[in-house]
Image (cartoon, rainbow, N blue to C red):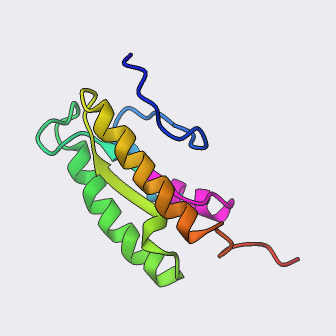
Amino acid sequence: MSRIQYPSNIRIVRVPCSGRVNPFFIIKSLLRGWDGVVVSGCHPGDCHYVSGNLVARRRFAILQDLLNLFGIEPDRVTFMWSSASEGDRFANLIKKVTKNIKRLGPNKKFESTW
């Protein structure tokens, strides 16, 4: 509504709750060549689904360890808290993440060699 600008090279996929994001979807995105993934959830204690964001936080911690095992740079996957009233904060975080991803370059870790 406030027409806050953020980089145009990102794609937003809306889900009802960050707790519904399966870590497999994040891994699959990276396998398909996405350069980075951001998961944004409600602040702890403000989840519309009671504890979905806490579930997401636990899953994300485990996912970070798994991505580290695969040799994926930690800055390629980001988890952040952001509410609907924090449009400026969301846009600034997206700009920061985009800048980090550009610094890392294209995701070629799983590039097919056949």
Q: Quarter of the image for the C terminus: give it.
A: bottom right
Q: Identify the image quadrant of residue 102.
A: bottom right
Residue at the far left: name it: 45
Q: Residue 32, position in %: x, y? A: 68, 59
Q: Residue 77, position in %: x, y? A: 45, 62
Q: Identify the image quadrant of residue 75.
A: bottom left
How many badges with numbers are in the image?
Answer: 0
4 vs 55: above or below: above
Q: Quarter of the image for the N terminus: give it.
A: top left
Q: Nearer the viewer, residue 98 or 79?
A: 98
Which residue is located at x 60 percent, y 60 percent?
Answer: 35
102 vs 108: above or below: above
- Asked whether 67 falls inside the magenta stretch, the response is no
38 vs 8: above or below: below
Q: Give the residues in magenta.
A: 25-38
51 vs 24: above or below: above
Q: Identify the image quadrant of residue 15.
A: top left
Q: Nearer the viewer, residue 41 or 88?
A: 88
Q: Is residue 94 among what the camera can see?
A: yes
Q: Residue 71, position in %: x, y? A: 52, 82
Left or right: residue 54 compared with residue 23: left
